[in-house]
Amino acid sequence: CAAGLATFDVLRDEDLPANAAAVGAHLRSGLRELARTHPSIGDVRGMGLMLGFELVEDRESKAPAARLAAQVVYRCFELGLLVIYCGLLANVIEMTPALTLTTADADAALAIIDHALADCEAGRFDDAKLAPYAGW
């Protein structure tokens, strides 16, 4: 109980819900900006710091780009950012960072996502890296 109460104190004293709302809005805005230059981003959604962006083959058909999602997750990992893919069609990149995430941290994450998407969209990702994780 003491640990739970201490956690509530930190949430209140550091105003972490407000931080999550503000930094989450910044991150969501940055992802929507990335969608302008990355045609594979079909949608950006979420609330606070729990965000996701859907990857599609093209925006007309909205066909899910599950393979691209796996590539982007792996490339982000190589560049120092941990994200996961999820969703019924395995084409949504989910981000659930700590409530203490800063705007600078969010900007660094956006730069990595931009880099990873650029690499994967341009075919600069070796699919053999994914082979050990087939069926994952």
Image (cartoon, rainbow, N blue to C red):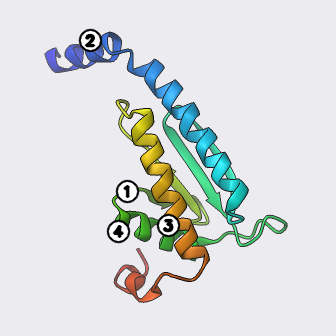
Write down the residue under mark 1.
Answer: 81
Depicted 11 relative to depicted 67: above or below: above
The x, y position of residue 133, in whole percent, is 37, 79
Please tell me which residue lies in front, 42 or 79.
Answer: 79
Q: CA distance from mark 4 to mark 2?
A: 36 Å
Quadrant in the picture for the C terminus: bottom left
Amino acid type, residue under disc 3 in the picture = Ala
Q: Disc 2 and disc 1: Cα gap in Å? A: 29 Å
Bin the neighbour count of mark 2 within 10 Å (Cα to Cα): few under 14, some 14-19, many 20 and up.
few
Query: Is the residue 99 above or below the residue 57 in the image?
Result: above
Sequence-wise, the earlier of marks 3 and 1 is 1
Q: Which circle marks residue 64 in the picture?
A: none
Q: Judge the density around disc 3: few (<14), some (14-19), many (≥20) Cα neighbours within 10 Å.
A: many
**Which image quadrant for residue 36?**
bottom right
Mark sitting earlier along the chain (2/3)? 2
Q: Which residue is mark 2?
A: 9
Residue 69 in the image, given as x and y percentages of width and height = 54, 68
Q: Amino acid at mark 1?
A: Leu
Residue 14: image x %, image y %? 32, 15
Residue wearing tag 3? 116
Left or right: where 99 falls relative to 37: left
Label 4 to label 1: alpha-carbon separation: 7 Å
Per the rendering, the mark at residue 78 is 4
